[in-house]
């Protein structure tokens, strides 16, 4: 029966994929086309405080659908994706009080007692694929969910078939109609599910769904990211029974109901890693505060191998680099956590343009995540790609240029390149950055970068 459902899901996804890709390109919403103007060559000094993690805040907000009681979240980052999730929950009749304003000060209270629809419409899902995180909670608590099929993604295909196969294994009925996924279940029932490949949002969706299922669910080959552990922490505070978070096997004993809770969003490890790399590239001494070194251990290992001096503190990491200090070239392969993250690959590539030799950077997570390479080449970088491997020749002099951001993490790599380039760099389409970096221009300017946002 599970195999039958899986086959159905695969065929339905295949039949709708092309339509979704076409629709995803027909964006009619107005996008603010601001740009960054960067004057390169300044060393960085001071402290950067890390915001709450976008990839922890979004599932935390979705988990509020699992209860009628208030869920209070602190350290929610002020980001475009968070605003999209607020809008999505609001369309369902969910009340969201807050957020506050200013860096690191946002808090919100979410109450889903007045929910009046179980649909995530296309106009919101197309702008943020993480909208699919409402699928598991809606089916678990209300027995019904209707979510637009996510379209294509700039960095590659990120299908949700593993989410749907898992829900089918839990006893849900899955169908697709006019670009929407309809999932219904009278009562989800615990089972054993083994993911074909590691999926973070799939793991999160099924953990939330299984929390209210009847019986015990075991997820094998589960994602181990800190954001998954944070979600489990929240669910346990809400009354869930979950064991094994942070390992490849997670066991969920279903309960009848969940209650409200208060929760702090964990620090954003990708934002922390981005500023660590920026400090190493530009030189100087920067404290990356309010972060967890353990969450970026793979990056710190690479930085040590590259000869970057740093030390861990009670509150974060201090990165030091003299202007004349050489950077050793590295060979790096992106892998699921706890190995080197794909979300720091582009930033590290910008750093490796200053390495003392040749680096090989292999991307194993997404098939189209080298779109920053042509833009770095425009600045003088010597990079060639061979399939999923980028060969970076170091000790190249980068020159300021007009460049264009293509996705969230590529945008960050271009900013880092601009910090070390000679002359003026203009980075356009920085709305990508606004999806995942809170107040980047303020944080970089605060440590000595000559960077400003220009309205266009």
Image (spheres, rainbow, N blue to C red):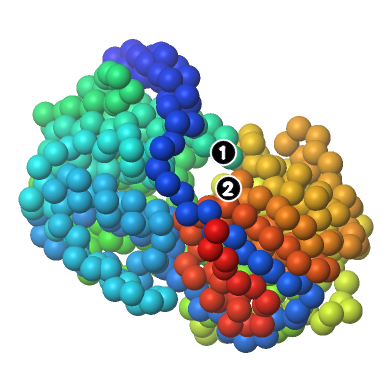
Q: Quadrant of the N terminus?
A: top left
| Vertical position of residue 168 compared to residue 438: above or below | above
Query: Count of labels shown?
Result: 2
Helix, strand or loop at label 1? It is loop
- Mark yes or no: residue 102 visible: yes
From the image, tell me which residue sits under label 2.
407
Image location (x, y in percent) of residue 340: 64, 54
- CB within 8 Å, label 2 to label 1: yes
Image location (x, y in percent) of residue 23: 43, 27
Image quarter of residue 310: bottom right
Residue in the foreground of this view, choosing between 308 and 101: 101
Q: Quadrant of the C terminus?
A: bottom right
From the image, tell me which residue sits under label 1.
154
Q: Is residue 224 left or right of residue 250?
A: right
| Vertical position of residue 17 compared to residue 137: above or below | above
Image quarter of residue 20: top left
Residue in the foreground of this view, choosing between 441 and 249: 441
**How many C-alpha atoms fall within 10 Å of the one at disc 2: few (<14), some, or many (≥20)?**
many
Image quarter of residue 126: top left
Q: Residue furthest front?
A: 456
Q: Is residue 218 left or right of residue 405?
A: left
Q: Residue at x 8, y 52 (%)?
A: 113
Q: Residue at x 52, y 84 (%)?
A: 314
Kindly identify which numbered label has been placed on residue 252: none
* Sequence-earlier tag: 2 or 1: 1
């Amino acid at each position: 029966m599970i195999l039958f459902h899986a086959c159905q899901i695969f065929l339905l996804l295949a039949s709708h994929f092309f339509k979704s890709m076409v629709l995803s390109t027909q964006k009619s919403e107005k996008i603010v086309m601001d740009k960054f103007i960067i004057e390169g060559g300044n060393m960085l000094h001071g402290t950067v405080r890390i915001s709450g993690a976008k990839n922890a805040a979004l599932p935390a907000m979705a988990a509020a659908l699992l209860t009628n009681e208030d869920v209070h979240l602190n350290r929610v980052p002020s980001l475009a994706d968070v605003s999209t999730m607020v809008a999505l929950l609001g369309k369902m009749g969910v009340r969201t009080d807050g957020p506050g304003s200013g860096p690191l000060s946002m808090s919100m209270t979410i109450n889903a007692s007045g929910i009046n629809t179980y649909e995530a419409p296309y106009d919101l899902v197309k702008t943020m694929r993480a909208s699919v995180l409402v699928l598991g909670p809606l089916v678990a608590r209300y027995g019904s969910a209707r979510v637009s099929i996510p379209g294509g993604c700039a960095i590659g295909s990120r299908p949700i078939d593993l989410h749907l196969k898992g829900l089918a294994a839990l006893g849900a009925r899955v169908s697709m109609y006019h670009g929407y996924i309809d999932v219904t279940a009278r009562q989800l029932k615990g089972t054993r599910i083994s993911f074909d490949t590691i999926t973070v949002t799939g793991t999160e969706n099924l953990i939330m769904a299984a929390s209210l299922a009847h019986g015990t669910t075991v997820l094998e080959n589960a994602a181990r990211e800190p954001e998954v552990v944070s979600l489990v922490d929240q669910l346990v505070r809400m009354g869930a029974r979950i064991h094994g978070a942070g390992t490849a096997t997670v066991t969920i004993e279903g309960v009848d109901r969940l209650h409200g809770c208060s929760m702090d969003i964990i620090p954003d490890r990708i934002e922390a890693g981005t500023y660590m790399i920026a400090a190493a590239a530009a030189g100087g001494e920067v404290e990356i505060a309010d972060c967890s070194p353990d969450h970026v251990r793979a990056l710190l290992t690479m930085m040590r191998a590259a000869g970057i001096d740093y030390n861990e503190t009670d509150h974060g990491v201090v990165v030091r680099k003299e202007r004349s200090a050489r950077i050793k070239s590295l060979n790096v392969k992106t892998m699921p956590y706890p190995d080197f993250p794909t979300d720091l690959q582009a930033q590290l590539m910008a750093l490796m343009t200053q390495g003392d030799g040749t680096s090989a950077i292999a991307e194993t997570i997404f098939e189209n995540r080298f779109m920053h390479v042509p833009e770095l080449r425009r600045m003088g970088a010597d990079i060639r790609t061979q399939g999923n491997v980028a060969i970076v020749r170091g000790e190249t002099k980068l020159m300021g240029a007009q460049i264009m951001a293509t996705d969230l993490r590529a945008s960050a790599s271009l900013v880092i390149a601009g910090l070390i380039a000679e002359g003026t760099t203009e980075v356009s389409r920085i709305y990508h950055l606004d999806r995942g970096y809170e107040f980047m221009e303020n944080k970089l300017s605060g440590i000595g970068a000559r960077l400003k946002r220009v309205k266009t």
